[in-house]
Image (cartoon, grey):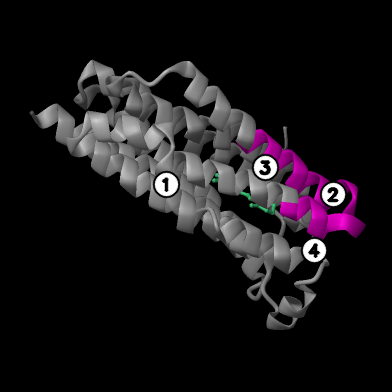
Amino acid sequence: MILFTNFLSVAKLATDDYVGFTFFVGSMAMMAASAFFFLSLNTFDKKWRTSILVSGLITFIAAVHYFYMRDYWAANAESPTFFRYVDWLLTVPLMCVEFFLILKVAGAKKSLMWRLIFLSIIMLVTGYFGEAVDKDNAAIWGLVSGIAYFVIVYDIWFGKAKKLAEAAGGSVLAAHKTLCWFVLVGWAIYPLGYMAGTDGWYSALHSLNLDMDIIYNIGDAVNKIGFGLVIYNLAIQSSEK
Ligand SMILES: *C/C=C(C)/C=C/C=C(C)/C=C/C1=C(C)CCCC1(C)C
């Protein structure tokens, strides 16, 4: 409903509201990326269409959440933590599905996908606890979340996923490698945002005046659209042959 009433009454966005600005730009970027992925679907070989479809779903789900988050921020000047984590709980597992889909050509099993999904849910649920439920222990929840994150990184860089990517070779291996970099560097943006927005041994960071939501919004744009473009590029290369 918020999505539709939006068009009737729009809260005023202050010129120095950088958080609000990144929510606004984020919603447009996610929407544009979704249109791009969906409309390109038919130009690819059948075997890549599911991957491209999932790329579009990731940015589309994010776009809808960004509409809500933008409004929530405009109305309350407060982090939309709940919408944020619902968005992640839907989109991060879908990113794990992407790994499985591109490695399917090398015989990836569903168990690999479920393992990554399971780890990502642990990572996100513990993060939510630290940010919203048990803030006094944010550092501990963040640590547990960080461990799950490292297991994901290890799995895709050195575990079974890596071996499957090597077996597939060529453009699948190249795409896998790029996605691995996204998870190692792009996803590392999020714990930074978390440390900017919660208290813990890292609270000295607060003096830098970094805003958690701006960091998260940058992370989302880089990772969700970037992931999709890696898959898009892979689909183009493989469809040309
Ligand atoms: C599209 C959304 C994405 C790719 C979200 C990714 C989120 C993370 C990698 C979050 C990680 C966190 C930690 C590693 C520790 C602190 C708590 C989190 C949840 C921010």
Q: Residue at position x 16%, y 30% from top?
A: 238
Where residue 198 is drawn, which disc sits there? 4
> Does the magenta portion include 28?
no
Badge 4 marks a residue whose secondary structure is loop
Q: Which residue is mark 2?
A: 132
Residue stretch in magenta: 120-143
Q: Earlier in the sequence, mark 2 or mark 1?
A: 2
Q: Earlier in the sequence, mark 4 or mark 2?
A: 2
Q: Earlier in the sequence, mark 4 or mark 3?
A: 3
Q: Which residue is mark 1?
A: 225
Rounded to the nearest angstrom, the CA distance separating label 1 from label 3 is 21 Å
Q: Which residue extends farthest left? A: 241
Of badges 2 and 1, the one in the foreground is 2
x, y percent for residue 21: 59, 63
Left or right, 201 with reference to 16: right
Q: Which residue is mark 3?
A: 123
Ligand 1 near label 3 (Cβ, under 8 Å)? yes
Q: Residue at position x 53%, y 56% from top?
A: 219
Badge 3 marks a residue whose secondary structure is helix
Q: Do the numbered discs 4 and 2 sit on residues whose CB atoms are within 8 Å?
A: no
Rounded to the nearest angstrom, the CA distance separating label 4 from label 2 is 10 Å
Where residue 29 is drawn, which disc sits there? none
Rounded to the nearest angstrom, the CA distance separating label 4 from label 3 is 16 Å
> Does the magenta portion include 136?
yes
